[in-house]
Image (cartoon, rainbow, N blue to C red):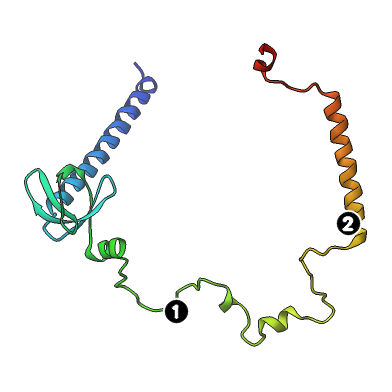
Amino acid sequence: MSLVTLLPFIVLIGAMFLMTRSAKKKQQQAAQMRNEMQPGSGIRTIGGMYATVKEVNEDTVLVDAGPGVDLLFAKNAIGAVLTDDEYNRIVHGVEHDLKSDTGVVPDDASSLTEADAPADDAAALPGDKSVDLGKKDEPAETETAGSEADEADKAVDAKSDEEPKKTDGDAEAK
């Protein structure tokens, strides 16, 4: 056998080795994270529920999911152990790390407009006509609209005369 025929098999075995190695490494990190859990830690289960650890046993974890709600989970059901800041930010909406307000993006566009020119002055530029979007009854428009509507009605009537009317199947049986 030549090296060229063995090369695909060697590459395949190498890829399988690398994939299993990375999977084992992830499993070991998850097991270590679960073993380092202690009462008072905030956790997220694999189902997406956030809770606080009350008690850690060999294979199970007792968590407090709310006032008067204690749940028992298998250790394997714990998806992540969260830091105190992260847990409080997610569950309670508490931000501890507010360094400065300079990098905060405003929610509206008012800060993006010039402060010198008020909005009313900007809207009333000379030569611009205001546009009224309200409906006005003008006789000339009503007559043309009415004649167009009459023509449309006539076209529908002509079409309905050409097509046979649909009847219910039970009507013929009676």
- Please tell me which residue lies in front, 18 or 2: 18
Outermost residue, front direction? Answer: 174
Q: How many labels does the image show?
A: 2
Three-letter residue code for mark 2? Thr
> Residue 18 sits in which quadrant?
top left
| Residue positioned 32% across, 33% down in the render | 15
- Please tell me which residue lies in front, 123 or 152: 152
Outermost residue, bottom direction? Answer: 116
Could you tell me residue 108's position as x and y percent?
54, 72
Nearer-N-terminus badge (2/1): 1
| Residue positioned 88% across, 31% down in the render | 158
> Residue 111 sits in which quadrant?
bottom right
- Please tell me which residue lies in front, 32 or 45: 45
- The numbered disc on residue 102 is 1
Q: How crowded is mark 2: few (under 14 residues within 10 Å), some or many (20 or more)?
A: few
Q: Name the front one of labels 2 and 1.
A: 2
- The numbered disc on residue 142 is 2
Is residue 166 left or right of 100 when viewed as pictured?
Answer: right
| Residue positioned 45% across, 74% down in the render | 104
Could you tell me residue 21's position as x and y percent?
24, 38
Could you tell me residue 25's position as x and y percent?
22, 43
| Residue positioned 27% across, 33% down in the render | 17
Quadrant into which the N terminus falls: top left
- Please tell me which residue lies in front, 144 or 125: 144
Q: How far apart are marks 2 and 1 (CA)?
A: 57 Å
Three-letter residue code for mark 1? Thr
Q: What element carries label 2?
A: helix
